[in-house]
Image (cartoon, rainbow, N blue to C red):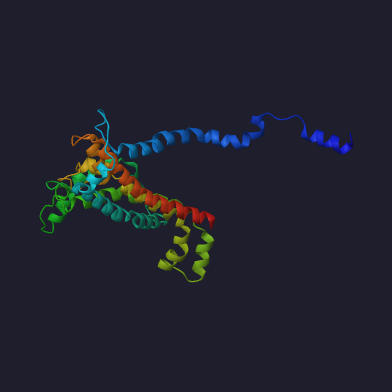
Amino acid sequence: MTDSALADVAALGPKKPWWRRNQQKVTPWLFLAPGILFFLVYVIVPIFQSFQISFLDWDGLGQKEFIGLGNYVELMDDEAFYTSLKNNIIWLTLYLLAVPAGLFIALFLNQTVTGIRLYKSLFFFPFVISQVVVGLVFSWFYDPTFGLMNEFIGLFGLGPIAVLGDERFVTYGIIAAGLWPQTAYCMILYLTGLNAVDPEQIEAARLDGAKGIKMLWYVVLPQLRPATFIAFVVTIIGALRSFDLISIMTQGGPWGSSRVLSFYMYEKSLSEYGFRMGYGAAIAVILFLIMMVFITIFLVKMYRDEKG
């Protein structure tokens, strides 16, 4: 055997076991496996089950009856469904006010002024309390007999307004309550983003005469693009899955005027209105498809940004 052949044999050496050869490739998947398993069991499987149940007439316990698109056809003639869909659109539109509000509060809190720690604590407060507390606080705030809002407008000679008892105002009143913690959440995202703003670019812009709105628009906001993207995603998804504040403040009333799709789905599936699992699943599928439109847009944008 030649010297070169002996060197090749020595380089090959004894064959390593499978684990040693693939350790680096397999290890990340082992760490991800529990998360993937939970995601499959608690998210992916229920999605497909919802699609399946939406084709059934089923009360959750008795005999299942396949009715095809019957639940979807009934939805098209359901006035309460359209009221819930309209309220979801109102939620989606007005809830986005939390993004610019969070930005401006973050810009204020990013300054070095006296008592800034106290201000920060006050603005962080709604983020750390539960939605139940937020709902109760705003229910008391709107109360027509002793609520602070009616005490205030009474100073101007205006009569008490039952915000949560009036079909014209109830949805807007609940959205205002939801904006309180959501604005705090967006503010935290922007405060984190402001810490990553390049001070050299700020200084260079100042030397070029930029300040105020121009500095914000051309220098700061482009560097806050990742925070803005996350704020929009979280806010839109939060608006579409709004449930807890409606449940606490009005139970969907008065006369169903403050329902949204998620609450209407709950009423039809699990409340005294029916235990109609198939009908509730059909509402859930419609809500899921609406969410998928936004999620797809965000994923495509994220992919394009990463691709450059």
Does residue 284 appear to the left or right of 169 in the view shown? right
Q: Position of residue 292 (x, y in %)?
A: 38, 48
Q: Residue at x 55, y 36 (%)?
A: 29
Q: How many marks?
A: 0
The answer to which of 116 and 281 lies nearer the viewer is: 281
Residue 171 in sight: yes
Does residue 11 appear to the left or right of 196 in the view shown? right
Q: Position of residue 75 (x, y in %)?
A: 23, 46
User: In the displayed structure, would residue 9 be above or below residue 242?
Assistant: above
Q: Position of residue 70 (x, y in %)?
A: 25, 42
Does residue 179 appear to the left or right of 141 in the view shown? right
Residue 133 in sight: no
Q: Residue at x 39, y 55 (%)?
A: 106
Where, by quadrant of the figure, is residue 43 drawn?
top left
Q: Position of residue 49 (x, y in %)?
A: 35, 36
**Furthest-bottom residue in this view:** 209
The answer to which of 182 and 244 lies nearer the viewer is: 244
The answer to which of 51 and 266 lies nearer the viewer is: 51
Does residue 178 appear to the left or right of 112 in the view shown? left
Quadrant of the rendering where the N terminus is positioned: top right
Q: Residue at x 73, y 30 (%)?
A: 15
